[in-house]
Image (cartoon, rainbow, N blue to C red):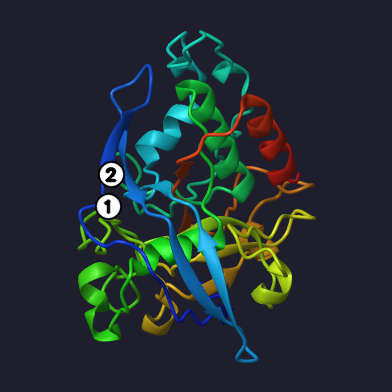
Amino acid sequence: MRNQAFFLPILFLSASLYGQDTTQITIPGSVINFRLVYIPTGQMDVQGSDGQTVSIQLDAFWLAAREVAYDEFSLFQQRQYDSDASDWPAGEYRADAVSRPTPQYLDYTYGMGTSGGFPAVSMTQQAALRYCYWLYQKTGQFYRLPTEAEWAYACRAGQDWAPEELGAYAWYYDNAYDAYHKIGQKAPNPWGLYDMLGNVAEWTLDEYQKDYLAAIGMETSNPWVKPEKRHSRTVMGGSYDSLQKECSCTHRQRSQPRWQARDPQIPKSIWWNTDSPFVGFRIVRPEQQPSAEAVEAFFQEAIRD
């Protein structure tokens, strides 16, 4: 499952460290919850392949402390959990109208584990985004995937990582025994984020571009490389199947059509990558919540069939 790797050197960053605020969210209509960590406003210096350095500014946001678990994602898949339970203050409830993943006809986890704390895997980026939209309808709070810049910024957490320390923080090729593990078993980074490196790689919001700085151009405040087509997207962090050098906060991986190699459908599923059990995701909740109109416009722009 070795995948082509690309690297974006990051010099790094200014922000307050440690003592991060956290909040716990229970998904309405269930007992399933997840925890968000407050990521402060900060600055990140990004160096391109030509040696050029660009300073990127990032607004504060809340980031899931852990990757989305199968237990959370399965609530999205099962319509019977969508009663009238919602935290919308005005009672506007439309979670039951959100499109859902089709049933899996193969074991996309390859027997590595589902319920009980394992990461949700093998979904397309579109499926991850539709989970965010469903969660928005359930809670009245806007959730999405992190941008590539947000992900890298949160991963570094104001410090450089020593490669020899990787085993304390990450499941990767040398210690994972060719399988992902339950989330949160390794040490968190200084901002309290678990499994940012290894275990499963994570979808970001960005369309993949080899030259990241050229792609963002003059957009140095909260940059997002917006999608123009279905493929490809940037995946970050490495996985249980990644070498040590591939598990870093600067590791960029390009999603591939071959991740659907076993899918017999024509056209291929918009929900599942049959051959990427090494990819999952975590979610962001922006500190500044947009209007309902802006949220709808965002998902229209972010999701490309």
- Looking at marks 1 and 2 on the same chain, the residue that comes earlier in the sequence is marked by 2
Residue 148, percent from left and from top = 55, 62
Give the residue type that dot 1 points to: Lys
Q: Nearer the viewer, residue 287 or 105?
A: 287
Quarter placement of the C terminus:
top right
Residue 230, percent from left and from top = 75, 53
Residue at 38% from the left image edge and 19% from the top image edge: 28
Give the residue type that dot 2 points to: Gly
**Under tag 2, what secondary structure?**
loop
Residue at 25% from the left image edge and 56% from the top image edge: 192
As drawn, 217 above or below 294: below
Q: Is residue 136 visible?
A: yes
As drawn, 282 above or below 85: below
The label number, if any, that marks residue 68 in the structure image: none
Whether label 1 touches label 2, CB < 8 Å? yes
Residue at 26% from the left image edge and 45% from the top image edge: 21
- Left or right: where does residue 152 sit relative to residue 259? left
Residue 107, percent from left and from top = 48, 47
Residue tagged by mark 1? 182
- Left or right: where does residue 110 sit relative to residue 267? left
Image-quadrant location for residue 110: bottom left
Residue tagged by mark 2? 117
**Under tag 1, what secondary structure?**
loop
Q: Residues within 10 Å of mark 1 (few under 14, many from 20)?
A: some
Q: Can residue 103 be seen in this view?
A: no
As drawn, 224 above or below 115: below
Image-quadrant location for residue 201: bottom left
